Amino acid sequence: EVQLVESGGGLVQPGSSLKLSCVASGFTFSSYNMHWIRQAPKKGLEWIALIYYDSSNKYYADSVKGRFTISRDNSKNTLYLEMNSLRSEDTAMYYCALTSGVYWGQGVMVTVSS
Amino acid sequence: EIVLTQSPTTTAASPGEKVTITCLASSSVSNMYWYQQKSGASPKLLIYSTSSLASGVPDRFSGSGSGTSYSLTINTMEAEDAATYYCQQWSSNPFTFGSGTKLEIK
């Protein structure tokens, strides 16, 4: 059974940093591209980052480019999202997702507020 | 950036009724994906590559379209289908979503 379990969210102040993790199981993690997608409260879905299976390519939405970094450790079956210079508009549920949205995690909430 | 425009924004259907949700792309895309999101849950893939049913999805759901016009159809509405539905394109970075269609049961 495919499982994606996010962690690392919480309440942080504007300008601070946070690192999310997504632990994968039930499939060969090192063979698949992975994504981070977020959803602000009562809003729609926003794709924010993609990393290739071998970390050879990374892509970002303009809204997070230069502030967020996607990475992965295939030896640990773990996907990461390092978030810097957080803003109130980054407040959202953050989901990791397997290539082409086949499977999603349960999400982790990030709240940026003073 | 490819903008996906979904319609309607909100709709309601009676059990047994047919429901169609449309997704118009600002530029041509090769395929469309559809997700169902119930309250408090993460999105679930319904349709991939425009018309292929994801594993475990009831066959009352179907997808069609090409180019800039796509649609999701529920052939016979059931109470459990009440949810928000999103289209998404994986053809062009950034991989944009439609704004969602909230479907309620009458």
Image (cartoon, rainbow, N blue to C red):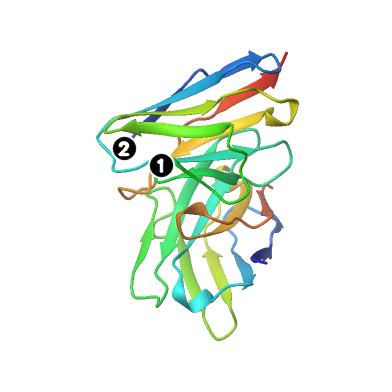
Q: Which chain is indicated by disc 1?
A: B
Residue occupying the far bottom of the picture: A75
CA gap between label 1 and label 2 equals 7 Å
Residue occupying the far front of the picture: B59
The residue sitting at 53% across, 51% down in the picture is A37
Could you say where residue B36 lies in the image, as x and y percent from the top left? 60, 38
Q: Which mark is residue A57?
A: none
For disc 2, the marked residue is: B2
Nearer to the camera, B93 or B15: B15
Q: Which chain is indicated by disc 2?
A: B
The residue sitting at 64% across, 66% down in the picture is A2
Q: Amino acid at mark 2?
A: Ile
Using the rendered image, report if marks 1 and 2 lie on a common chain: yes
| Secondary element at tag 1 | loop
For disc 1, the marked residue is: B96
The residue sitting at 42% across, 61% down in the picture is A50
| Secondary element at tag 2 | loop
